[in-house]
Image: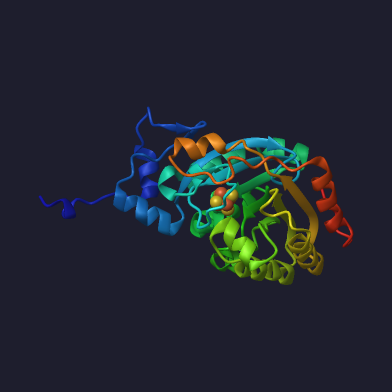
Amino acid sequence: MSVALVERPSPVELVETRPVHARMLGGIPVADHLSRGELLIGQRTGEVGSVHSWELVTAVDGPGTRMTTFLAGCPLRCLYCHNPDTMTANRGVPVLADDLLARIRRYRGVFAATGGGITLSGGEVLQQPAYARRILRGAKELGVHTAIDTSGFLGRNADDDLLADVDLVLLDVKAGDEPTYHRVTGRRLQPTLDFGRRLDALGIETWIRFVLVPGLTDDPATIASIADYAASLGCVTRVEVLPFHQMGRGKWAELGLSYELAETAPPSAELVASTRAIFSSRGLTCF
Ligand code: SF4
């Protein structure tokens, strides 16, 4: 019999036929049992995502205790990326949306008690919009607060339906001008700015996040551009200035990638304070 004539069950049906000793990703089953064809279909429908990892965190990635899920694959190549192993989609493992949602369901009590919820991060969450849509919709049906952490570069992938299930966007604005943005990420800034304007029009609460890197993103004039932009958006309730650190350095070496910031020191406390002051002076709440 030709292989093409073998009838395969859909990814959803395959949940029932999963081997007992399947690989797990922090307690969530990895869908290793899917064929390549089933994976492709599942990724298109959003039943399957490429997931790097997940963790429970408090006081980062949004309010309260959060289950942050890192999706694999990102179109940017930030010089300071501390998770360069999330840049390519093939470094993730396949996880069924139903399995991720089952884990989210288990933490509903924790989320309710702490004012927390889920955050979809990456990599770039909007590189897998169908999967994100399923997870966000499922979480809302469970009454769970939802956030996405995104550069906004693929904001066009998020239709209004998807955004209707998002309570909070953590919008990473990596520079305030095109040349610096390109130097930092290899991409253009404008899609991020456009996405922020859309969030404002839709009235979706947004936190702006900015990574401060000495010698790379610390020009006060370009930071002022980000601050002016953030202040022009009524949806921005908070700005976070994140000091550059070297915690991702080892991963660049492990992956055999050249790391340009090896000699860059974290910003001084004075530089962090003066940067936050640029945002505060526009009436923004800045941490
Ligand atoms: S957007 Fe995030 S995941 Fe992508 S390269 Fe930049 S820091 Fe890394």
Q: Residue 149: x and y, percent?
A: 64, 52
Number of numbered discs overlaid on the protein picture: 0
Q: Residue at x 84, y 57 (%)?
A: 278
Q: Is residue 108 left or right of residue 157?
A: right
As drawn, the residue found furthest toward the top would be 21
Q: Residue 230: x and y, percent?
A: 77, 63
Which one is nearer the viewer's eye here, 51 or 140?
51
Q: Residue at x 63, y 53 (%)?
A: 148
- Colour scheme of the rendered structure: rainbow
Q: Residue 43: x and y, percent?
A: 42, 54
- Is residue 96 at all visible to an observer of this figure? yes
Q: Residue at x 55, y 53 (%)?
A: 124
Q: Is residue 22 above or below residue 89?
A: above
Q: Residue at x 69, y 66 (%)?
A: 196
Which one is nearer the viewer's eye here, 275 or 24?
275
Which one is nearer the viewer's eye here, 161 or 80?
80
Q: Is residue 193 above or below residue 34?
A: below
Q: Is residue 283 above or below residue 61?
A: below
Q: Residue 213: x and y, percent?
A: 69, 48
Which one is nearer the viewer's eye here, 97 or 256?
256
Q: Is residue 221 above or below residue 131?
A: below
- Is residue 138 at all visible to an observer of this figure? no
